[in-house]
Image (cartoon, rainbow, N blue to C red):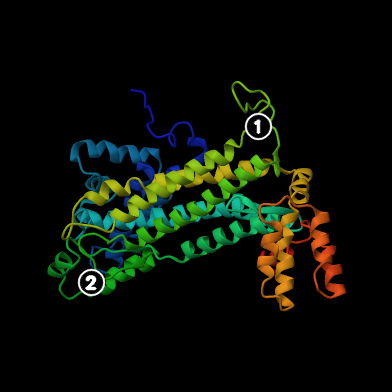
Amino acid sequence: MQNFPISPLDGRYSQKVSEISPLFSEFGLMYARTKVEILWLLFLSEKGIAPQIDEMLKIGLLTVIENFSEEEFQKIKKIETTTNHDVKAVEYFIRELVPENLWSWIHFACTSEDINNTAYGLILKDGIKVVKQIFQKEVLNNLKEKSIEWKSVSMLCRTHGQNATPSTMGKEFSIFWYRAKEITMVLQKLQITAKINGATGTFSAHAIAFPNEDWISLGQEFIEKKLELDWIPLTSQIEPHDQQAAILNEFSRLSSVLIDLCRDVWGYISLGYFEQKTVKGEIGSSTMPHKVNPIDFENAEGNFKLTRGIARTLSDELPISRWQRDLTDSTLQRNLGLVFGHFLLGIRSLNKGLGKLKLNQNAIATALQNAPEVLTEAIQTVLRAHGQADAYEQLKDFSRGQPMSTEKIKAFIKQTTLPKEVKNRLSHLSPETYCGLSEALVTKFVK
């Protein structure tokens, strides 16, 4: 029977998220479970708890992990049709790889959550690494380059949608680079916690079978040394998912920053500050041939909204479990790939859009020349610096609701009581040059 994907991540956009599909798919989850089960068996043998495993068998089991493929996955899925239990299917699959004297040591003293929480920990660790690398290459580096390239390009700003103190295009782009970089650094430092302590987090089965073993230390060693995750000592049956929630919250925050960027660039395109490079054969509008729509920024915004929405739902719900265990988190965690998938799709659309941007210097310059009123801030501030307490009121009466021109501005400056050299400095000021330390800020902080 033909497979009809419900999610566009598995259909229309599958090629654009191909780097993470093997991680967050059912295949990826089965692989991670298999890895944990095999490493746990080898660990028990290494510690002298399970029977000794010879070097050839050990190499063979590690090779299964290293070369896990569709063939192994399908074997597990076939077993699952009988067991109707995915983790148990992995256990029975591994039975086929080892002699019978080791069967009782596969999944020893484990509850399914011991395998699942560690598997998801491995998936998240790899997923963050892959997406972070792509984000760095396709967005952060892009924003950094544009911040530096355009650090001297003066532009009229808008606060509350109205003409406001100018900045430079590079400085405005640097804001988003800095915000995204800082969140990425937080994300990188977050722990990915895991546990392997039994049905209610008490090591009860472990301790009753081998009362002389230090199971607390062994559990910590397995998580930290063999899986390279962060051990959490106190749990119920489930790892509490607090750190997963923290990770998801950072993806939510980062998505909000990128939505903000998409909307701003969309607005700059609408104002004419940017033109978009045309792509041969690409259609802007099905009925208006002249149009080059900012679709990449709109697609990116939509996918970042999905990322944020799904991440927020998961971060709200995953840390909640009735008493020592309910299964709500199991079905929720299967959607972690949606967060990463839509975020990656957003990255790809944003990168494509940024690559099409072309500064319209004439439009930017015209907007500045048509807004001489923004200089009233400079004049009233200089008047204040020279002791005139009513400076704001003077400039408000002069400019508010009035058509402004460069000539009117210069006439106002001339009639003030400011020193001659100060009047001369203000008279030579223009909206294009009234950008403060915008360029210096980029030079100093975008590194």
> At x 75% / y 43%, what residue is drawn?
363
Left or right of residue 394, residue 123 in this image: left
Which of the marked residues, 2 or 1, is nearer the chain's N terminus? 2
Image coordinates of residue 369 in percent, x first then y, are 78, 50
Mark 1 Cα within 10 Å, few/some/many (few <14, many 20+)?
some
Where disc 1 sits, the SS reads loop
- Looking at the image, the residue that sits furthest to the top is 287
Determine the image quadrant of residue 200. bottom left
Q: Is residue 148 left or right of residue 199?
A: right
Q: Nearer the viewer, residue 286 or 53?
A: 286
Q: Decide: few, some or many residues near mark 2? Use Cα within 10 Å; few <14, some 14-19, many ≥20.
A: some
Q: Position of residue 389 (x, y in %)?
A: 67, 75
Closest to the camera, between mark 2 and mark 1, is 1
Amino acid on which the number 1 mark rests in the picture: Val
Could you say which is closer to the camera, residue 441 or residue 124? Answer: 441
- Viewer-nearest residue: 305 or 87: 305
Quarter assignment of residue 204: bottom left
Residue denoted by label 1: 292
Identify residue type, mark 2. Trp
Q: Classify residue 194 as left or right of residue 359.
A: left
Position of 50 relative to 326 (above/below): below
* Mark pair 2, 1: CA separation: 64 Å
Q: Are marks 2 and 1 in contact (CB under 8 Å)?
A: no
Query: What's the mark number on residue 215?
Result: 2
Q: Residue at x 80, y 56 (%)?
A: 408
Residue with the most extreme left position: 208
Which residue appears at 23% of the width and 63% of the height? 50
Looking at the image, residue 429 sits to the left or right of residue 85; the answer is: right
